[in-house]
Image: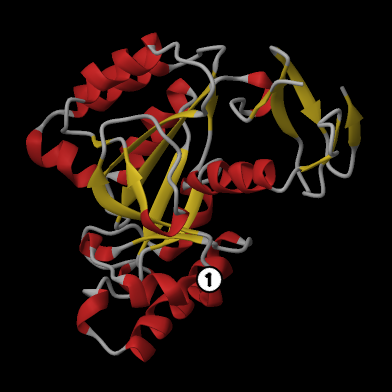
Amino acid sequence: MDIKFDLFPEGKTKALTMSYDDGPVFDRRLVEIFNKYGIRGTFHLNSGRLGQDGVVSPDEVSKLYSGHEVAAHAKTHPFLDSIPIESVADEIIEDRKALETLVGYPVKGMSYPYGVYNSKIIEMLAALGIEYSRTVVSHHGFEIPENFLAWHATCHHDDNLMELGKKFLDFAGGGRLKLMYVWGHSFEFDAKNNWNLIEDFCAMMSGKKDIWYATNIEIARYVKALKCLEFSAKRDMAYNPSAISVWINANGKAVEIKSGETVKF
C-alpha cells in the first residue's frame, strides 16, 4: 500500500493562509478584501493596545475578524528575549485571556513580537497553551514547518508576492503538503499606497479548486491530526483518533478518514 500524507481537506493538494500583526485600523480594509475573495487568515493582536490610536477597538474584534482567526501577539508587544521569563509567561497568558473573552473561543496561536524568540521561550510555549507561533523569517518555499512553534512563512507581502503566488499556482510536485503562507502588517499597505498589491494577489488566488483557504490554527491542527493517524502493520487499515477528518493519498486515490473512524484500504 502506497500511502502519502500529501492531501488537505476534501483531497485538495495545496493550502493558502495569511498572517497579519498588531491590529491596526487598516485591518478593516484588509479583512474586507480577504472576505471579497474568500481568502482566510489569522490576525495576531496585542490586547493591551486595543483601542489606542490607530488600533482597532476591543468591541469590534469579534465581528471584524469573524471567519478568520484571532491569535496572540503578547499583551504589550515587548521584545520577549529582553524581559524576565516570568514576564513572558504573563504577556502571553494575559493576552490569551483578554482575547478569548472578546472572541469566545480558545486562542491557541501567536506570532513573536518583532520576530524575537529563543529556545527558552519556545520550550515554555506549550505549557502556556500555545500550539504554534510565527516568526518573521521567510523561506520562499511551500513547505510545512518542522516545528510549528518556530513557524517560518513563505514570504512577507512585499517580498515578490505575485511571483511566488504564480509559482504556487503552477506548482505540481506531489508527495508533500504544499502551503503558501504570507505575513505582514496592514498599515504597510497604507504607508506605501500599494493596496492594489494585496487586492491583485487575492484576486489571483481566489476560487481555486485545489486550494484550501485556511487560518493558521486550522493548518496546524490538520497536520497534527494527520500525524496522529494509526496504521495496521500491513498498512491496509488506518484509525483516526483525532476530532477532525483527514485525507490521505492511498495508491494514488484520495481517501477521507473521519474522526474516530477505521478505514480499510
- Is residue 175 shown left or right of residue 140? right
The crowding category of the residue bearing disc 1, from other C-alpha atoms within 10 Å (few below 14, some 14 to 19, many at least 20), is: few
Q: Amino acid at mark 1?
A: Ala
In the rendered image, the quadrant that contains the N terminus is top right
Residue carrying label 1: 126
In x, y percent, where is residue 81? Answer: 23, 77
Q: Residue at x 84, y 32 (%)?
A: 234
* SS at circle 1: helix
Q: Quadrant of residue 190?
A: top left
Which one is in front, 253 or 80?
253
Q: Residue at x 73, y 14 (%)?
A: 251
Q: Up-down: is 112 above or below 198? A: below
Q: Up-down: is 201 above or below 109? A: above
In x, y percent, where is residue 133? Answer: 41, 58
| Image label count | 1
Colouring method of the image: secondary structure
Confirm whether residue 36 shows in the render.
Answer: yes
- Is residue 249 shown left or right of residue 238? left
